[in-house]
Amino acid sequence: MAQKYYDTAVFGTTFLGLGAALQMENVVVIEKGGLFGAEFVNSYKVCAPKIVEPKTELGKAFLENLQIRGLVSDTGEIYPAPAVYVLSSYLKEKSVDILLMTEVTGIKKVDGYYEIVVYHSNGFETIYAKRILDTTTLGIGHDVAGKYEKQKQLNAIVYNPDGSELEGISFNEQNGLYTYTLPVDLETTRYDAEEMLCGMENVFAEKNLQISSIASDFSYTMKPSRKDVEEQFIWIPSTAYTNLVEAFEMGVRFAEEERA
């Protein structure tokens, strides 16, 4: 198998990661899952309404596209799930190498490149990149993310016919859904978090609430950060931004700054 050399390897098909990749040349995006934008969509991440005003041309176009499709409210609240399809439409216009269902099993510096060993459906593969942009929440190949302060939640969509109020419940006016947010410790497993959530059955019943769907991924909140893992290896977690438009814009901006 011929070895592949890239200028940049992006970890995570996040809104930030794909925003950056769309503004780069000779780039590969590596994702351990199988979906785009999971940090906002699969986690049912609750985002406070915020008017985002992108400065980049691609960021402006992305926001306008969402607005035209009725996915952004006047207060800046976003309907997240369909935004993934809007994001995907840009990848039809520009060819980007994307490896889904791919685990990074090793990273080391070799002759000015990062040697990245990955494992996917074709087995092990080694690719080389001059630079790594890690946009994942928990980080890949380093412990910088583990030391950074963050909060962890398990979110669930709830049926709330009476519009009942309960601590932890929020309403998204753009998609009309109620979300219940359960804060958990960083060490809490998915099984234990679900048990905690289901243990609230009586609390929900008193408010005439029913769980409709539990997020497949944990949600995280943290302050925006850009950390140098080492030279030309940068960690910028997409989930740290207020919403997916802001995350996308920051990815585009990163690419443009690096290219300048």
Image (spheres, rainbow, N blue to C red):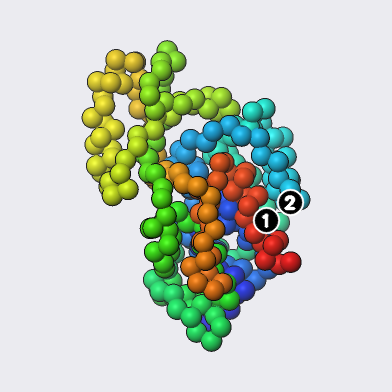
Q: Earlier in the sequence, mark 2 or mark 1?
A: 2
- Report the amino acid beneath label 2: Thr
Please tell me which residue is depicted at 37% across the width and 44% down the height of the picture.
152
Residue situated in front as seen by the camera: 38 or 140? 140
Residue farthest along the top direction in this orientation: 162
Residue situated in front as seen by the camera: 82 or 130? 130
Please tell me which residue is depicted at 32% across the width and 40% down the height of the picture.
184
Q: Is residue 247 above or below residue 208?
A: below
Q: How many marks?
A: 2
Residue 105 x/y as whole percent: 39, 71
Q: Is residue 101 above or below residue 7?
A: above
> Dot 2 lies on which element?
loop
192 left or right of 87 in image: left
Residue 83 x/y as whole percent: 60, 41
Residue situated in front as seen by the camera: 57 or 33? 57
Which mark is on residue 56?
Answer: 2
Name the quadrant containing residue 168: top left
Which mark is on residue 253?
Answer: 1
Please tell me which residue is depicted at 67% across the width and 52% down the height of the picture.
90
Task: Work out which quarter of the rendered image holds the C terminus and state it.
Answer: bottom right
Name the quadrant containing residue 33: bottom left
Can residue 245 be spotted in the picture?
yes
Residue farthest along the right direction in this orientation: 57
Residue 180 x/y as whole percent: 39, 29
Tag 2 near tag 1, CB within 8 Å: yes
Residue 173 x/y as whole percent: 56, 24
Residue situated in front as seen by the camera: 87 or 73? 73
- Report the amino acid beneath label 1: Arg
Please tell me which residue is depicted at 67% across the width and 27% down the height of the picture.
74
